[in-house]
Every structure is written in structure tokens, then in C-alpha cells.
């Protein structure tokens, strides 16, 4: 039985159009993306199988081209489509953050940072520069490190702040281990940056650490 033989209100595309994407399961959303199934399986069946084989959406989205194309019903064209969808979602979240006044506990900001950094295998240190009204001036990747370390050069951070005439900053880095809990080194770095930035009358609003599924805030933990 193909999806076309199902009652219209049970077909993934019709369910999405009638009720919204949030009402669909992950397998049904994948079915819309896949468009067709394989012999003996509908697109929904194939979506369920892929979620089981890859261990969830995260591992499916992060699979490289070779691993992705090993699975029946997938190929380089679908891989390209999936990567395009992921990048569009990141850009959509970035535009949402840019158009709003940013706060350190902003859900949109955390969603964007998770989409951008949670899958990376090396540490990245970023700065979110803000003006006097807490509007985003720019997101800037500053330093790239290894799987468990990134070296920070305060002089380059200060130069970027002065270049953009920012009045405050949120610093961000990721933990490729998946655990966003701050290390003692993270805490000491934050205190150092806070003191250094006061010398140029720039406020460190927060330090955010991105893990696999969560973003922690130094300010929310009363560490800043």
C-alpha cells in the first residue's frame, strides 16, 4: 500500500497543510522530504527505518556523504537537499536573532547557537557584539581550537569590539564533548575577560557554553 492510497487526512503532506508541521512525527516529516519510499516500504516506513538506523535526527543530519548514501533510498541528491535545509534553518534563526533585542537568556539566541555549534568536533569561540540598545551588531567567529581546547587572544577580541563600536558583548564557545558545564578554566577566563573589558568601558553581558542539546548561561548560574 502506498501513501496515495491512505485516507487524505492521514497523509503527511495533507496533515501538514491542514494542521501545521508541529503535528507531524519526525518520520512523517522525513517522508515529505524523501517524497518516495522504496520497494515494499512507504516514505513514512523509510523515515522510521532511517531514524532507527542512524539513532535519531541529530545523527542523520550530521552523517557525512559516504555514510548517508550507504542507506537504501538515499543518495547524493537527497544529501545535498538535506544540507541545504539545515543551512536555511540556521540562516532563518540568525535573521530572527538579528532583528530582535538580544538578552542573554533569549531562546532564539540559544536555538541559533545550538544549530550552529552543537555538532562541531572542535571548539569555536565567538563574540556577539551589541550596541547601547542591546541590538545585535554582528556575530563573529574569533578563534578555532581542538576537540577540548581553544586559545583566546584578548587583544584580538578588543580590536573587534573597537572596530564595531560595540558597547557590550556576549562571548560564546562550544564543548564538543556534549556537556555544556563550565570548567574551572572557563570560569577563570570569564572573570579575566570581564575585568579586561571594563578597561575599555565594554560590558560582558554573558558567557554562553553550547553543548550537544543545551546552552548554559554564566549569568543564569550566577557566575557573572
Image (cartoon, rainbow, N blue to C red):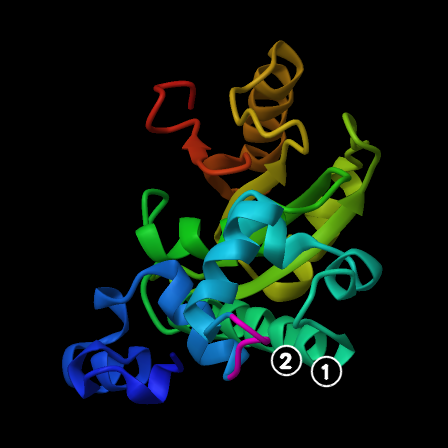
Read off the residue under disc 2. Answer: 81
Quadrant location, the C terminus: top left
- Quarter of the N terminus within the rendering: bottom left
Residue 196 place in picture, x, y as percent: 63, 30
Look at 39% across and 70% down and name the residue there: 29
Q: How many residues crowd around disc 1 within 10 Å: few (fewer than 14), some, or many (20 or more)? A: few
Residue 129, image x and y in percent? 54, 56
Main SS type for the magenta part? Answer: loop
Picture coordinates of residue 187 (x, y %)? 57, 17
As rendered, which of 80 and 215 lies closer to the eye? 80
Where are the magenta residues, as a range? Answer: 36-40
Q: Look at mark 1 in the image and give the residue it sits on.
A: 77
Compared to residue 129, the image places residue 152 above or below, namely above
Q: Residue at x 64, y 48 (%)?
A: 126
Count of numbered circles on the image: 2
Kindly indicate whether the residue at mark 1 contacts the one at mark 2 (C-beta within 8 angstroms). yes
Among the 4 quarters of the image, the one containing residue 8: bottom left
| Residue 39 forms part of the magenta stretch | yes
Q: Residue 77 vs residue 99: left or right?
A: right
Left or right: residue 150 versus residue 132 is right
**Residue toward you, 162 or 39:** 39
Query: Residue 176 versus residue 81: which sits nearer the camera?
Result: 81
Q: Where, by quadrant of the figure, is residue 60 drawn?
A: bottom right
Badge 1 element: helix
User: Image point 54% across, 19% down: which residue?
Assistant: 182
Residue 193 in the image: above or below residue 82: above
Q: Is residue 123 left or right of residue 92?
A: right
Can you name the residue that lies furthest to the top here?
Answer: 184
> Does the image show residue 134?
no
Residue 77 seen = yes
Q: Position of residue 104 (x, y in %)?
A: 37, 44
Tag nearer the camera, 2 or 1: 1
Amino acid at each position: 500500500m502506498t501513501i496515495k492510497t491512505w485516507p487524505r487526512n492521514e497523509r503527511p503532506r495533507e496533515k501538514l497543510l491542514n494542521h501545521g508541521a508541529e503535528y507531524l512525527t519526525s518520520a512523517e516529516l522525513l517522508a515529505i522530504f524523501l517524497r518516495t519510499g522504496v520497494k515494499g516500504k512507504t516514505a513514512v516506513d523509510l523515515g522510521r527505518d532511517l531514524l532507527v538506523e542512524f539513532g535519531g535526527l541529530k545523527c542523520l543530519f550530521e552523517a557525512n556523504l559516504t555514510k548517508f548514501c550507504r542507506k537504501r533510498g538515499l543518495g547524493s541528491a537527497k544529501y545535498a537537499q538535506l544540507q541545504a535545509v539545515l543551512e536555511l534553518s540556521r540562516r532563518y534563526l540568525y535573521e530572527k536573532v538579528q532583528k530582535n533585542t538580544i538578552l542573554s537568556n533569549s531562546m532564539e539566541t540559544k536555538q541559533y547557537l545550538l544549530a550552529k555549534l552543537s555538532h562541531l568536533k572542535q571548539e569555536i569561540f565567538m563574540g556577539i557584539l551589541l550596541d547601547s540598545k542591546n541590538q545585535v551588531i554582528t556575530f563573529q567567529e574569533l578563534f578555532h581550537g581542538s576537540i577540548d581546547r581553544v586559545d583566546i587572544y584578548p587583544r584580538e577580541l578588543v580590536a573587534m569590539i573597537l572596530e564595531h563600536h560595540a558597547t557590550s558583548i556576549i562571548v560564546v564557545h562550544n564543548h564538543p564533548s556534549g556537556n555544556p558545564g563550565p570548567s574551572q578554566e572557563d570560569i577563570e577566563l570569564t572573570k579575566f575577560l570581564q575585568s579586561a573589558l571594563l578597561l575599555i568601558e565594554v560590558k560582558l553581558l554573558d558567557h554562553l557554553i553550547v553543548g550537544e542539546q543545551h546552552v548554559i548561561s554564566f549569568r543564569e548560574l550566577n557566575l557573572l
